Structures are given as C-alpha cells and as structure tokens.
Amino acid sequence: MSGRARLTLCSAAATLMASLAMMPLVEQASWVLQAAFLLAVQSGVGAATRRVPLARPLTVLAQAVVSLVLLTLVFAREQAIAGLIPGPRAVQHFADLLQAGADDVGRFAIPAPLSEGIRLMMVAGVLVIGLAVDTLAVTFRNAAPAGLPLLALYSVAAGLSDGVADWLWFLVAAAGYLMLLLAESRERLSQWGRVFGGAPRTPGGPSGPVAPLRTGRRIGAVALGVALVVPLLPLPAIGGGLLDGARNGVGAGSGGGGTISAVNPLVSLRDSLNQDEDRTVLTLRTDSGDLSDLYLRIVSLDDFDGTTWKPSKRQIVAVPDDFPTPAGLSPDVRRSQVTTRIRAADWYAQDWLPMPYPPSAVKISGNWRYEPVGMTLVGDHGQNTRGKTYEVTSLAVRPTAKQLASAPEAAGSVRSDYTEVPSSLPASVAKTALQVTRSARNDYERAVELQDWFAVTGGFEYDTEVQVGSGKDAISRFLRDKRGFCVHYSFAMAAMARTLGIPARVAVGFAPGSPQTDGSVAVSLKDAHAWPELYFEGVGWTRFEPTPTRGTTPAYTLPENTGDAIAELPQASRSASAAPSAQPSASTSCSAADKKAEACLGALPLDEAEQGGGGLPWYEIGGWTLLGAAVLLLALLPMLWRMRRRSVRLASAQHTGAAGAAAGGVDGGAGRAGADGPDAAVPGPGVVVDVPVRETAEAAVAHVLAVWRELTDTAWDYGITPDDALTPRRAAARIVRLGELDDTVAASVHRVAGAVEQVLYAPRPRAEAGLADEVRRVRAALRSRVGRRTRVRAVLAPRSAVRAVWDLADRWTALRTAWAARLATLLRRPSGEQGQSV
C-alpha cells in the first residue's frame, strides 16, 4: 500500500474512531455502520481524484458533491430528481429533517431514540468532519490541524453524554489522531528516499524502529498520558450552567459544600407540552387523601433580569436527614405530613429531583446535594433521576384566607431580594398590575385578583404554540395579546406581584398527574408546568395558579373559603390528548390501617442501595479513598521514579568507583561500557545512542556513564535541555555556561565529562572515585541559581522523568522483536526438506 493510500485510510479511520464517542447519545448504533460506509465512499472518491490528479480545490469539491448525493440517496431519495440529484424538494426535506432532529435533541433525554432527524444529523456530521480531516491531512498533507475537527466531533459528544465512559471514547479518538500523525510522518519520510533507522542495539541484532517514528510514538504516549492524568488532578476548573454543574460535579470534595449556578430549565417546557406522543415521566403513590395540590416541584426561579427568570447562584450542602422548617412558616398554620414514593422513567434524566413542596426528608440513593434556599436536591458528578425510585416526606400546608390576609410585611432580606424589578421592565407592566388590583386592601387580595384576572376574568387563552418570547417587551406583549401557556402566565404574574411589593418567584415542575386503576398516579410530559410562588410572612412561599385550564386553583384563594373549612377541590385538569382510564379509577386516599402498613407505597420499593440522606456507604467511601490515593500516587510517580533512579546511579557509582580505580581498568576496545541494568548503556550527550556493549565489561565503567547521565538529567531538570549532538567535553562546557556555574563547580562538571571520555576512548579505561560527590555538588549549585517555581518543578515534575516512558517503549520494542525472531525460527522449514512432498 502506498503512503498516500495509507494516509487516506488512516484519515477515515480517525474520523470514525472519534465519531464512536456519539454512540451513547442514542439508543441504536446502526447509524455507525451507515456513516462508516458513506465515509469509505467519500474517502475513495478523494483517493481516486488525487490519483488522476485533480487540483486540490477540485478534489475537495468532488468529495463534497459525492457526499451530498449519498445523503440524498439515503435520506431524500423520493424527493430528489431521478432519486439522486438534490432538487428544491430534497433541500426542503433536509431542512425539515434537521429541524425535527433539533427538536428531538431538545425533547428526549440521553440515550434518545434514533429518529430520522437525529440519524441525519449524526451521519451528515460525520461526513462533514471526515471531509475536513481528509482535506487537511491528505489533500493538503498537513495532519496536525486535522485534530481540530476531530476534537470538535469528540467535544460535542462528550458535552452531551453523562460522562460514564468519556475516558474510553477519549482514548479511542486520541488513538485515531496519533495513528493519523504517524501515517503522515511515514508518508513524508518515504518521499526522501530510503528511510533511515537507528543502529543495532546489540551486535548483529536487528535495527530498531525508524528513529523519527520511535520519537513520535514516545511523544504521543507522553501526551496521551498527560491528557489522561491532568484532568484527575485537583486543578481549578471553569464551570457553570444547570447541566454543566450537575454533570461534572457541582459540589466540592465529599459534598460538604460548593455552589451551583444554573441556566433557565424552561428551555424545553413548550416542546414537552407539544409532544405528539405523551409519555409517562413519573409514577407515584402517596398516602395523601387529596391529589389536587400534589405538585412536583423541580426548581425555583428567583433571578429576574427583565427578560426572563432563572435560578440564582446558590450554596449547596450535603443532604440533611431532616430538612429545616420552611422559611416563614409559623406554628399557627395547619399542616399535615404526606409521604410520597416516586419512580422516574428509565429515559427521564433530570438533574434536579422532582418533589412535593415543602419537603421534610428524602430517601434516595446516589450522589445528591441540597440547596437550602429553594429546598431542592440536585445531582452531583453526573447523578440524575434516570430510573430512580425515592421517597419524599413533605408537608401539606393549609393556610386560611384570614391568615394570608393578615400576614405582616415580609422580613427585610426577603422583601429586598424577591421584590427587585429591573429598570428595563416596561412601565406598562406595573401600571396594569395597579389597575387590576385597584380594589384590593392587602397583598393577599392583590395576589388573588391577579390570579383571577389571568385565569378567569381577563380574557386570556391557553395556547402552547405561542413562542416563549424574549427581550424586555416580552411580558408587556403577552399582556397585550393575551395568549400563551404556563411560562407566560407564571412569569407575568410573578413580575406584576413584584411591582406591587409582594415577594415572588417562579416554580418549575409538574402539575398533579392522573390517577390509575391500580391506585398509582401517572405524571406525563404534558403535565410539565410552571407556576408563581408568593411569600407571606407566617405562611411562607405559597402557590398560586394563574394559568387557565391547567393545574388546580388553591383552596385558600376560592371565594367560599372563609377561613375555617377547606373547600372541596377540583381534580387536576388534563389536556385533551390525555386518554382516560378504561375502568373507574381506584381511590387515591389511604385509610389509617393502610398508612400504618405502608400499603399505599409498597408497590414502588426503594432502590436497594438506598442511602438515608444521600450520604455514601462505607464501601463507597473506601473505594473513593483508594481511588484518591491511586490518583495521588500517579501524580507523584515522576518524582518517585526520579528519586529512585538518582539513588541507584550515585550509590552504585560511589561503591564501585574505588574498586574500579584499584583494578587499573579493563581491556580496551570498541564498546567497552557494559553491565546489567537500565543505565548500563545509556550514554548522554556526545555519545552515540546505539553503542554495542560487551557483557564482560567491568561494572565500574558502566557506572561512570550512569553518573554522566545523572549529571545531564539533573541539568535537564533545572532547565538545561541535553544536546545529543555534542561531545561530553562540549556538553560540559554548555552546562557550565547556561547554568552560570563558578570555577569550582565547573571543575566538577569537567571532571565527570573527562571520566566519560576516558572510559570510552582510552586504551586502558579506569573508573574514578568521588564522581557521585561531584554530581551532588553540581546539583546543589544549579538548585541555588533558579527560582522557587523551577526548584519545585524539578522535584515534583522533573523533565528527565520522560526517560521512564522511553525505557518502557524500548523494552516493548525489544520484547516484540525477540518474539518475532522466535516465531520466525519456529516456522522456518529445515533446508533438507525443501522441495519434498508428503
């Protein structure tokens, strides 16, 4: 296979290997085979056009045209001209598929079903990246920049995945890129003529790998190791956003603290409400006798910038065993305790935990953190709700209208934080709020009048097809058009309440679900909801329902609720598309005996790995401790290896130096330095790398070379890179000059260099004593002349530790060569049997 053909093959393989990182994003992997086939055709076209040869731009154009025809044949054959040529109908079909795919990406959790739109996005994306990589690496013969599109392909997949096996996909993608770089290097060398190699390491032995290729492998191995190890070290990180925070670890350490900042989680709420196929998100059982107020709250939005609402940046802590009493709730308000057991669908991966509000305790397995202000739970380090079963103990708070109407003004901090309205909010919003509530006498009556105006008397219509809207005029435009869905109503009422001085925020979650025949309750995508929460001192955060035909109107806002009796509440409203049960629904209330026996909850058992407050069991703590110790040991390996190597070199030299000198040397001849050990034949600058070594040479001679290697490695650690093109004498002079060493220390350097020349070139070489002390003197001098940062690096991350990787590579090469020779010997047929037949 020619060098260019090999490079083309490696380019396609690297693209395909990087695209494998997208496999966890969808449920089916059939798209990979389709993408591989189309990528092979695309690469084949490039190889053919380069062989013609065509001009480089024409080669790229030919590949692009063929790729478009292939996509048309696969995805838009019926809309294309003659089934191949993409006409206007095919282009429109592509646009519709891409739009559908984008909607599916925002709608489904990972792994998403492989819809036609998602398949087009993934296959077309692989072809686009493949064309970019082939163009850079093969057509323009510059493989290094081809790593950028490969990185983009991997980054998209890693950013969307849950992080479980990101390291594996990184290894695969990195291996593909390194393979591409090596193929390009080999192809370039082949243009020079005869490829050169290193000298044999043993007399008569086979040559090692080509020197540049061997160096490339070493660099690649080091880079890959650094890329894998560095992310594990406790380095500063940049994070932010709801998904980023929860997926990559929102807490610090073991969960005792940390912060979380979040983007607006309502991005896909409208898409959920507009689903053609309603899907069950949560199944629950509760001992509450009334489902109408069983809202499942995910998160609260309290940061209002005039355009939208979003969660504030909050401190998070470990999940407590018992949650504190909700802010502002006094003992005079009637309440009851409710226990609800909830099971999330296997496909529903929410970073925030849906719970009834206000929660008192949560039993759930996994890594969760508690945000005290909103009383919410958020997943940590990739934790989400997928397939989780958990139990929530919550309070059913039942204030009376009288208690709400007589509530005193909120505390200063609550009032200042939750009544803030930006100056960009149009004045018409506050003006409308004053007009609607002009007859109210207190904040409670104002809140009720706002709710009734939106839900009943204001002429508003519920419409999920209306865009969410953005910009400072979004709320005023909604108040004018009077059409929208829960986002519009909750945003508008909370903003108007703030202009009236009532503390307000927006809650996001699910409205009450539908009772089932088995006594459970099903919560579906179409139950996704948003509602305003207003704060009343003595009651706390209180739910209101301004959205027409959605949710349930709170009992404390109904006219007939005089304060002592709780009015009969309507059942939760359902969308028209929700199919009713075929049989009468079983009662959702529980008797006292049922509650005692937990009969209402037993059908949804908790996870076996249940952890009372989200804490870790002992075996998991032990596992993380061992993992932390392993990571720390891995980070310290360069320092430990370097200390061990220095000790061996200098101690051996000190013990054998005098013996070698007394012996008067050994016989001369080429290649006298030899002994067992990793430093037996590793001469430094000025010495040919592949000098043959006799096994009968005196060990003292080898240790002189080990001392010289220690000297040059020490200088390397302190910033003086070795130069293998120099003789020992010139290398010593270079160390003295760059290290700015005084005459005494310079004499030590030159003495070691002279000892190296003596054992290599003298007719009767002899080992000198005291060389180890000379190296220690030089090390102390170099250390005293550099800054603190260089000294710390020389200890913790010495540059010369890269020799450990080189040693492993050389040993692997020698082992592979030995086994290849042994296999060839076993398979070689005796010469006397040639030509004979059985």
Image (tube, grey):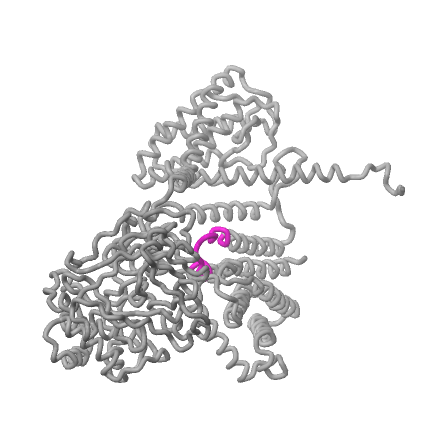
> Left or right: where does residue 425 sit relative to residue 289?
left
Quadrant in the rendering for residue 240: bottom left
Q: Which residue of the protein is positioned furthest toward the top in this rendering?
A: 662
Quadrant in the rendering for residue 765: top right
> Left or right: where does residue 375 sit relative to residue 635?
left
Return the residue nearer the eye: 487 or 255: 487
Quadrant in the rendering for residue 813: top right
Part of the protein shown in magenta: 155-170
Is residue 769 positioned above or below 342 on the image? above
| Magenta span contains residue 404 | no
| Residue 420 percent coordinates (x, y) | 17, 68
Is residue 9 positioned above or below 704 on the image? below
Residue at the image point whose x is 42% and y is 25% from the top: 772
Q: In which quarter of the image is the C terminus?
A: top right
| Residue 651 percent coordinates (x, y) | 45, 23
> Left or right: where does residue 424 sit relative to residue 191?
left
| Residue 815 percent coordinates (x, y) | 62, 37
Q: Quadrant of the N terminus?
A: bottom right
Give the total number of marks visible in the rendering: 0
